[in-house]
Image (tube, rainbow, N blue to C red):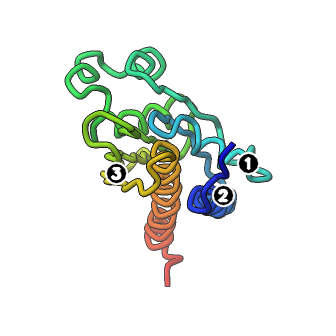
Amino acid sequence: MSEIPEDIINLFKRNYILAQKLVARLRANGWYIATAESVTAGYVASFIASVPQASQCFRGGIVAYDTSSKVQLLGLPEELIRDTNGISSEISQRMAEEARSKFSAHIGLSTTGFAGPTGREVGLVYIGVSTGKEIRVEQKNLPARLSSYQREEIRLQASLEALLLALNTIDSVSVTTQAQSGKGT
């Protein structure tokens, strides 16, 4: 059995630290989050759920790993799935919207992309966030330095990027809300 590379261990640690920050911010705002994941296959939900008191802000998640699951579980149009192979900015956007809607959450977070080891554009991921007022999708090209751990490295990096996008979204919504209510500085 080979030893897990330090880079992979560090990605796990960084994900957990971001999940702790995310749970704290969600709880402070009284908000709920839900996930719809493909490329990360449940990592985002798992990191959030591993934080104590996550049940006070995490409604749940859907892992729609293959294209038929995106249709059956998330209600995405078959023609959109067929035209994009289930991976695109629009797919990520719709996944985030469906997560938020299906779980009655304030924030929906999604991931879709190519983890490899073969296929088109390995490391290309789309991360989406929906707040009901705003939908954002970020495209990332995540490099994999560890050939024998390529899939894990890309999935963990995508999870990290998703948690970071959720944190940044909460911060921008909080600032906007404070400014609109006259509580801003």
Q: Which residue is mark 3?
A: 136
What residue appears at the point 24 percent right and 23 percent down from the top-left corner?
80
In the rendered structure, the answer to whether residue 174 lies left or right of residue 85 reads right
**Residues marked 1 and 3 touching at CB (< 8 Å):** no
Determine the secondary structure under disc 3. Answer: strand
**Residues marked 1 and 2 touching at CB (< 8 Å):** yes
Q: Amino acid at mark 2?
A: Tyr
Q: Residues within 10 Å of mark 1 (few under 14, many from 20)?
A: few
Q: Which residue is mark 1?
A: 50
The numbered mark, 3 or 2, whose residue comes first in the sequence reads 2
Cα separation between marks 3 and 2: 23 Å
Q: Which residue is mark 2?
A: 16
Cα separation between marks 1 and 3: 26 Å
In-front residue for pair 99/110: 110
Determine the secondary structure under disc 2. Answer: helix
Q: Amino acid at mark 1?
A: Ser
Q: Residues within 10 Å of mark 3 (few under 14, many from 20)?
A: some
